[in-house]
Image (tube, helix red, strand yellow):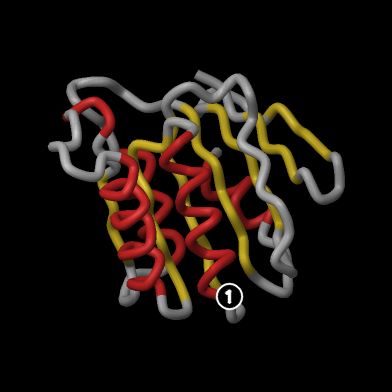
């Protein structure tokens, strides 16, 4: 596996060695999120350090569910609301039926962990339905990007 860190707000990418595929998106404002077309099944680490509008949050949650996100890990400001939002988007996708196991999105919130602990959890504990998930989308809803920090944590 290898790490491909891409800050889509800057158009920068770096190959950082043997970890996994990671796409980093710095979102200082409510702007469109782009899931890489190559991501079929992936996990999403959601970093929240600013207020995010409820409608925008659900729009992003729905996009994640519809594009193959199978693990959502939220960390930061009101992270439990992201956990709930992704859960509801997943439920709404299958209204009136049981969510098939291979389409279920596992959600976690990490209000008491450090960023380092959440990244380690993301790297070690996010298999889905017996499948290792190698692709990771990081959505950074903050005012200061964390690309360099994530580079070091994922190496």
Quarter of the image with the C terminus is: top right
Query: Could you say where residue 98 lies in the image, as x and y percent from the top left?
Result: 13, 37
Q: Kindly give the residue lying farthest to the front in the view shown.
A: 96
Residue holding disc 1: 53
Left or right of 42: which side holds 71? left
* Residue 94, placed above or below residue 109: above
Q: For numbered disc 1, what is the local secondary structure?
A: loop
Q: In this view, does 10 lie above or below 101?
A: below
Considering every residue shown, the one lying at the far left of the view is 98
| Residue drawn at 54 percent across, 23 percent down | 18
Residue shown at 66% from the left, 48% from the top: 33
Task: Tell me where residue 13 appears, x and y as whole percent.
Answer: 78, 34
Q: Could you tell whether 151 is left or right of 110 in the image?
A: right
- Picture quadrant of residue 2: top right
Q: Is 35 left or right of 89, judged from the image as shown? A: right
Q: Where is residue 134 in the image (x, y as percent from the top left)?
A: 43, 26
Question: What residue is rendered at 65% in x and 45% in y?
Answer: 24
């Amino acid at each position: 596996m290898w790490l491909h860190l891409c800050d889509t707000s800057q158009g920068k990418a770096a190959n950082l060695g043997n970890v996994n595929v990671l796409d980093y998106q710095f979102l200082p404002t409510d702007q469109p999120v782009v899931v890489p077309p190559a991501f079929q099944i992936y996990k999403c680490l959601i970093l929240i350090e600013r207020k995010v509008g409820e409608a925008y949050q659900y729009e992003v949650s729905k996009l994640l569910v519809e594009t193959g996100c199978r693990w959502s890990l939220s960390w930061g400001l009101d992270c439990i609301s992201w956990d709930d939002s992704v859960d509801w988007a997943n439920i709404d996708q299958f209204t009136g039926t049981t969510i098939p196991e291979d389409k279920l999105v596992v959600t976690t919130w990490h209000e008491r962990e450090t960023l380092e602990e959440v990244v380690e959890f993301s790297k070690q504990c996010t298999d889905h339905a017996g499948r290792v998930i190698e692709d990771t989308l990081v959505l950074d809803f903050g005012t200061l990007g964390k690309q360099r920090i994530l580079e070091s944590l994922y190496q």
